[in-house]
Amino acid sequence: MFFISEVYTMARRKGSTSLQESTYLALQQLNIPFQRVDTNEAITMEDCTLINKKLNIKMVKTLFLCNRQQTSFYLFITKGDKPFCSKDFSSALNIARVSFAPEELMKDMLGTKIGAATVFSALFDKGNNVQIVFDKDVTNEEWYGCSDGTTTGYIKVRTEQIINNFLPYTNHKVSIIEV
C-alpha cells in the first residue's frame, strides 16, 4: 500500500536533501504558505494520483530538457496528464528540437534525481543557465502541486506565488507558452 502522511503546513525538521531544505527555507523567507505530505517514493505521474487526492490538487509534470549540444537547458512545467511533444515545445519557443537532459546533468544542475524535477531547483541555478518555461494551462490553475526536490515529499502552493514571488526571488524570468 502506498504511504501518504497527514497534511502538514510546516517544513520538515530536517530535510533529506539540500534542495529540500532550501525549498522550505525559501518558502519560509518569502512567507509563502504551503501544504505538504511525505510519501513512499513516487516516480511516475500515476504514483501522484493518491497524492493529488490527499492535497486536493493536480500535480504538475516538470521536465528537464536540453538541446543536442547540451548548451541550452529548459525546465518545462506542464499539466501532469498532458503528453509532451518535443516538436510543439520547440516550435512554441522557436528553438531547435530538445530532448530530455541526461540524469547526471539533472543532479549537477538541479540538485535532484529523475522523478523529482521541480521548479524549486531554480534555487540552485545561480547562473540562470536553465530557462523556466510554463505551459499556459498550468498558470491558469489556482494551485500548484509538485515535488519538494525529493521523490518522497510533495507540496501544494498557490500558482501565483510560484510565478510572482518565488521565481523572482531566484532571479528567474518565466516564459509562458501554449502547447
Image (tube, helix red, strand yellow):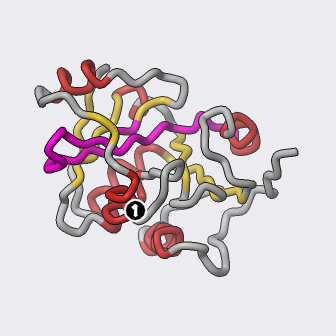
Outermost residue toward the right?
Answer: 1
Expressed as whole percent of the image width and height from the top left, the position of residue 103 reads 40, 53
29 vs 58, nearest the viewer: 58
Q: Is residue 35 magenta?
A: no
Q: Is residue 62 magenta?
A: yes
In the image, residue 163 lies at what x, y percent? 35, 48
Identify which residue is drawn at 60% across, 55% down: 151
Locate the C terminus and report the quarter of the image it occupies. top left
Q: Residue at x 34, y 65 (%)?
A: 108
Q: Looking at the picture, how far across and down is residue 49, in whole percent?
A: 70, 34
Image quadrant in which the N terminus is located: top right
Instruction: In the displayed orientation, state which residue is furthest to the bottom.
Output: 14
Badge 1: how crowded within 10 Å, few (<14), some, or many (20+)? few
Front-most of 12 and 39? 39
Q: Kindly state the secondary structure of the residue where label 1 is placed.
A: helix
Question: Residue shown at 54%/24% (left/top)?
Answer: 81
- Rendering quarter of residue 110: bottom left
Q: Residue at x 12, y 30 (%)?
A: 95
Magenta residues, start to end: 56-77
Q: Image check: 18 left or right of 69?
A: right
Q: Amino acid at mark 1?
A: Lys
Using the image, determine if residue 76 lies above or below residue 118.
above
Report the residue marked by disc 1. 107
Residue 88, x across and y down, in percent: 26, 19
